[in-house]
Image (cartoon, rainbow, N blue to C red):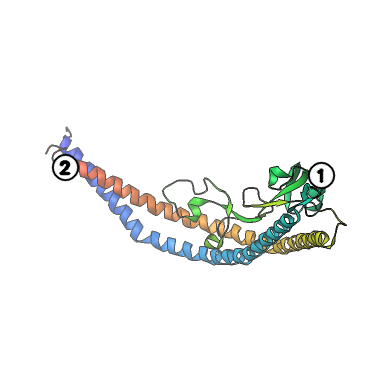
């Protein structure tokens, strides 16, 4: 028996209609229940992950404030004065990069030496210096997971370390402290103050040494929290993948229904399909 074009069209409409009804039933019946359960289980780890990050964040602020204090003290020591017609700094500063790197090793990632005028100090004398960058708390974050992007087939594409703030605390599959992060804020420069040239200058150097010790101590105290956050986030990540996968299925069903409707619109349009 010869199959007519009209019967083929009706068969196609019937097949697609059945497929559409099946997808809609899935999205309104069993799938929402599975999604709700997965979301509830994810929340059991999402909340404590955020709480631990929020415990850590104030300490990062304190560290960076102390770094700024150090930069400010170095700025005071670098103030220029004129002595017997010669412009010099108010405190004697080392011209050696090695002096800077050894004294400030915990808060800089490198040192150099150049004319003071090249680093904002009003003298042509060579001065050793280092650049201070902020510490930063970061999470190894997958944007598609954290932001609920379900239009892609890859939940972990573009995963990278990104800054953690109060607004995204708990994000990522791990937490890591980036000390002296060159991708973070540039807080200014430090210089090595030569000892034994007066109470004021020695006081600057002593205060700086104390601040550095405090920074090191605070960092050490954060290690257990950072490890704890990462352990919790590893579990969170597993449940997050499960939740994302279900939401992806839901999105795929919705997209498929829209595609079927588009085809049905064509197949049932008399102006496109002859009766």
Q: Is residue 15 visible?
A: no
* Nearer to me, 199 or 51: 199
* Nearer to me, 20 or 81: 81
Task: Point out residue 200 in the picture as x, y percentages from the top left corner.
Answer: 81, 62
Bin the neighbour count of mark 2 within 10 Å (Cα to Cα): few under 14, some 14-19, many 20 and up. few
Relative to 113, say whether 1 is above or below.
Answer: above
Q: Residue at x 81, y 53 (%)?
A: 103
Q: Which element is circle 2 on?
A: loop
Q: CA distance from mark 1 to mark 2?
A: 83 Å
**Which is nearer the N-term, disc 1 or disc 2?**
1
Q: Which element is circle 1 on?
A: loop
Residue 269: mark in rendering? 2
Task: Point out residue 84 in the picture as x, y percentages from the top left corner.
Answer: 81, 49
Please identify the quadrant where the C terminus is shown. Answer: top left
Q: Residue at x 33, y 53 (%)?
A: 23
* Nearer to me, 223 or 95: 95
* Nearer to me, 216 or 258: 216
Would you say 236 lies left or right of 214 here?
A: left
Bin the neighbour count of mark 1 within 10 Å (Cα to Cα): few under 14, some 14-19, many 20 and up. some
């Amino acid at each position: 028996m010869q199959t007519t074009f009209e019967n083929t069209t009706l068969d196609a409409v019937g097949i697609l209609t059945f497929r559409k009804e099946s997808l809609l039933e899935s999205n309104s019946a069993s799938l929402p229940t599975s999604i709700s359960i997965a979301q509830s289980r994810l929340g059991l780890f999402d909340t404590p992950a955020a709480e631990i990050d929020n415990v850590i964040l104030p300490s990062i602020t304190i560290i960076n404030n102390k770094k700024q204090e150090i930069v400010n003290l170095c700025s005071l020591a670098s103030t220029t004065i004129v002595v017997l017609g010669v412009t010099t700094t108010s405190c004697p500063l080392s011209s050696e990069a090695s002096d800077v790197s050894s004294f400030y090793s915990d808060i800089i990632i490198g040192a150099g030496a150049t004319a003071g005028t090249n680093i904002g100090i009003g003298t042509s004398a060579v001065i050793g210096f280092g650049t201070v960058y902020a510490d930063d708390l970061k999470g190894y974050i997958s944007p598609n997971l954290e932001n609920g992007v379900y239009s892609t087939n890859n939940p972990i594409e573009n995963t990278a370390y990104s800054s953690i703030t109060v607004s995204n605390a708990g994000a990522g599959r791990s937490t890591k402290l980036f000390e002296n992060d060159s991708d973070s804020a540039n807080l200014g420069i430090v210089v090595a103050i030569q000892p034994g040239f007066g109470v004021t200058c020695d006081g600057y150097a002593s205060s700086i040494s104390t601040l550095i010790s405090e920074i090191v101590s605070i960092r050490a105290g954060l290690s257990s929290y950072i490890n704890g956050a990462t352990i919790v986030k590893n579990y969170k990540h597993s449940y997050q993948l499960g939740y994302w996968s279900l939401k992806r299925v839901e999105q795929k069903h919705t997209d498929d229904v829209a595609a079927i409707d588009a085809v049905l619109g064509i197949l049932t349009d008399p102006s496109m399909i002859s009766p």
